[in-house]
Image: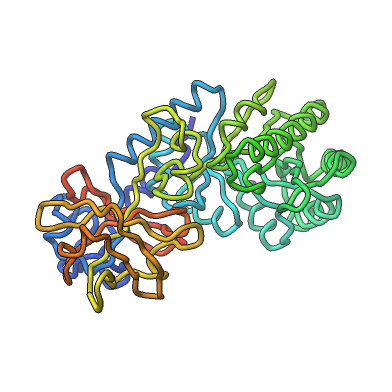
């Protein structure tokens, strides 16, 4: 069986030369290839980063990959991690290497990116009604018999538009689709059984489509892990399961899929059955120090030890101490996420030593500055020029700010540089 990704295309990224396009990296690396830099395993801070700089921990990545693979195996589910999280073929290759069966994408442009690296199994977790996109997809499917893509449908109008566009494109292969179900007041998806049944019937009747399953997205209900929040998600998943059971006779090689990064345990509990159950969680790879630390089934309060470890950090330098109790740092909204929580100060680097920054808090972000409120214990140790490591919340909106991210070993040495394509 062919590989799920073109290993040669991924390896070729090591030949890219580092230059001014990649913010945060040491100027001394300019003109060198990724392979040349990593061969020397330089200490990132000895090399002189032009901060701020985003980093990934290799140890944490390895741990998270193994932890999620083991969890999925024990619970009888497959994993198609959401590639929009990192948009990195290198990281996706690592996910495939430990058992992921496909990549999930949100847009046709993301699909094109992953197809450029030979990815053969794709879940497009969205409705696709753009005639130009469907024409490209039809040509891609027809040119590569090993390429498979599944996308969603949630209206008979959508089925008609897709069928018309695929016919006009001369598609030879039918496009696999899942009927999507969405809770009232959330995002896309059929809102009732009658609509779902009508969409399924329309898809079965179309010679250009092949109905293969049912899709949902429980995370559209939010990240509430209280008893009430859990019951709302369970109720939604019960509805999805009932629809899957009802529509199963119409489907080929049936797939039932859901699973964000907060309630994937409930998905495994509620949607496993006489079909392939496919999770689409993506954030597990890095987890975080905020939203998903609080809500992931493997890290939230009460979770068993050994869960995910935060693997992504952003480093910034103190550039000003204009008043007591305040430090300004060279990190802002252009560098780090702020849509879920503000960054979390973790530790201060002093030479080769570290000082914990418990009690300090980021109060605000400007475009290029962070306002760090200092604890009494940190008043005399946080100085202009100090480097501080920050945890992040919602890593999806950190990855998209960095095109080339150093991966550090346990000693802080650079062993890889991960390329992203947003």
Residue found at x 50% / y 21%? 74
Q: Quadrant of residue 385?
A: bottom left
Which one is in front, 100 or 330? 330
Answer left or right for 145 relative to 211: left
Image coordinates for residue 124, horizontal then vertical, percent: 62, 48
Answer left or right for 357 relative to 280: left
Q: Is residue 403 above or below residue 238?
A: below
Is residue 16 something that shows in the picture? Answer: yes
Image coordinates for residue 344, horizontal then vertical, percent: 36, 56
Is residue 31 something that shows in the picture? Answer: no
Q: Quadrant of residue 32?
A: bottom left
Residue found at x 48% / y 34%? 100
Which one is in front, 373 or 124? 373
Image coordinates for residue 353, horizontal then vertical, percent: 11, 51
Answer left or right for 290 relative to 82: left
Q: Is residue 288 above or below residue 200?
A: below
Q: Is residue 219 above or below residue 133?
A: above
Display coloring: rainbow
Residue found at x 22% / y 53%? 35
Image coordinates for residue 188, horizontal then vertical, percent: 73, 52
Which one is in front, 63 or 92? 63
Residue found at x 47% / y 55%? 396
């Amino acid at each position: 069986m062919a590989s799920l990704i073109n290993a040669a295309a991924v390896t070729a990224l090591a030949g890219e030369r580092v230059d001014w396009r990649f913010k945060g990296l040491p100027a001394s690396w300019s003109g060198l290839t990724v392979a040349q830099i990593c061969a020397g395993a330089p200490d990132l801070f000895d090399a002189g980063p032009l901060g701020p700089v985003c980093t990934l921990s290799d140890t944490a990545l390895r741990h998270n990959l193994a932890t999620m693979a083991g969890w999925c195996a024990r619970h009888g589910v497959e994993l198609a991690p959401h590639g929009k999280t990192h948009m990195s073929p290198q990281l996706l290759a690592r996910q495939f290497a430990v058992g992921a069966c496909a990549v999930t994408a949100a847009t046709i442009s993301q699909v094109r990116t992953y197809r450029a690296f030979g990815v053969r199994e794709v879940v497009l977790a969205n409705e696709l009604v753009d005639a130009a996109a469907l024409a490209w997809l039809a040509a891609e499917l027809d040119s590569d018999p090993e390429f498979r893509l599944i996308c969603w449908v949630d209206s008979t109008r959508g089925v008609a538009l897709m069928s018309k566009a695929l016919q006009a494109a001369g598609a030879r292969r039918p496009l696999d689709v899942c009927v999507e179900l969405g809770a009232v007041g959330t995002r896309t998806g059929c809102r009732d059984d009658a609509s779902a049944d009508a969409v399924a019937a329309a898809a079965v009747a179309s010679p250009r489509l092949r109905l293969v399953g049912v899709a949902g997205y429980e995370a559209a209900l939010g990240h509430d892990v209280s008893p009430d929040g859990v019951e709302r998600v369970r109720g939604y998943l019960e509805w999805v399961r009932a629809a899957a059971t009802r529509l199963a006779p119409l489907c080929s090689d049936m797939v039932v899929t859901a699973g964000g990064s907060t309630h994937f345990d409930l998905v495994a509990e509620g949607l496993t059955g006489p079909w392939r159950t496919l999770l689409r969680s993506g954030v597990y790879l890095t987890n975080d120090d905020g939203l998903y630390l609080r809500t992931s089934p493997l890290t939230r309060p009460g979770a068993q030890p050994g869960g995910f470890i935060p693997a992504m950090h952003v480093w910034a330098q103190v550039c000003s101490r204009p008043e007591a109790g305040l430090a300004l740092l060279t990190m802002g909204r252009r560098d780090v996420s702020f849509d879920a929580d503000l960054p979390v100060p973790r530790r201060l680097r002093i030479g080769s030593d570290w000082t914990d920054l418990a009690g300090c808090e980021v109060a605000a972000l400007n475009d290029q500055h962070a306002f760090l409120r200092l604890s009494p214990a940190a008043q005399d140790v946080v100085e202009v020029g100090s480097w501080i490591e920050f945890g992040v919340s919602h890593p999806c909106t950190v990855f998209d700010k960095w095109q080339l991210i150093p991966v550090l070993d346990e000693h802080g040495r650079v062993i890889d540089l991960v390329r992203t394509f947003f």
